[in-house]
Image (cartoon, grey):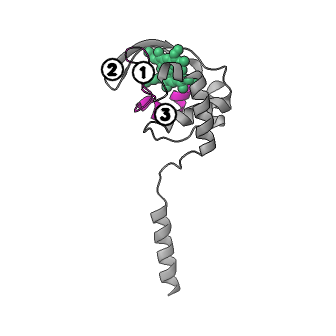
Amino acid sequence: MRILILFSLIISLFACNKSTNTPPSKEIMAAGQKHYTAHCKVCHQANGEGTSMMNPPLANNKTVTGSPEKLTKIVLFGQSGPIKVNGKKFNGVMAPHSHLSDKQLSEILTYIRNSWGNEASAITTEQVRKVRFK
Ligand code: HEC
């Protein structure tokens, strides 16, 4: 009997151990939205769709939901030159945002990775700090 209980316990533990990301807290998302509105919205828009021809969308963008390090680098240090997002070409200049704090950036990055249908892991202050000083 004990063995049986132990078995079902182990099986239910495995069943619960899904590797999905835990969604970020409401506080982080609210702070991220606030900073996004102040520093990014003018170009990438409140709905993350960007503006056609000029500013690429952040919604449904694999760079945004992909490698945390690559994304952090782009936002910290800027990016320029031709890119293609969902088949559309952009060739502009995105200024660096290294004047923002590690905390502000981690909140913005977590926000854009989990808004407008995007779903990806949160980015911590520590992760931003590492990329900044690499
Ligand atoms: C003045 C307009 C402007 C502002 C403000 C701005 N961006 Fe950008 N962003 C751009 C442009 C233009 C590009 C495309 C650069 C290129 O062609 O390589 C870009 C590119 C990006 C990319 C890379 C997209 C890709 O698919 O490679 C990310 C991510 C991004 N921006 C996030 C942000 C975040 C987060 C903020 C706020 C902290 C921000 N941007 C503020 C104009 C802006």
Q: Position of residue 43 (x, y in %)?
A: 49, 19
Given contact means CB atoms under 8 Å apart, are the residues at marks 3 and 2 in contact? no
Asked if ligand 1 lies within 8 A of label 2, the reply is no
Q: Name the element at disc 3.
A: loop
Q: Amino acid at mark 3?
A: Ser
- Magenta stretch holds residue 40: no
Q: Position of residue 91 (x, y in %)?
A: 41, 12
Work out whether 7 lies above or below 126.
Answer: below
Q: Which residues are magenta?
A: 48-74
Which residue was labeled with disc 3? 67
Which residue was labeled with disc 1? 56
Q: Quadrant of residue 57?
A: top left
Q: Position of residue 114 (x, y in %)?
A: 50, 39
Given contact means CB atoms under 8 Å apart, are the residues at marks 2 and 1 in contact? yes
Q: Amino acid at mark 1?
A: Pro
Which residue was labeled with disc 2? 88
* Residue 134 seen from this side: no
Asked if ligand 1 lies within 8 A of label 1, the reply is yes
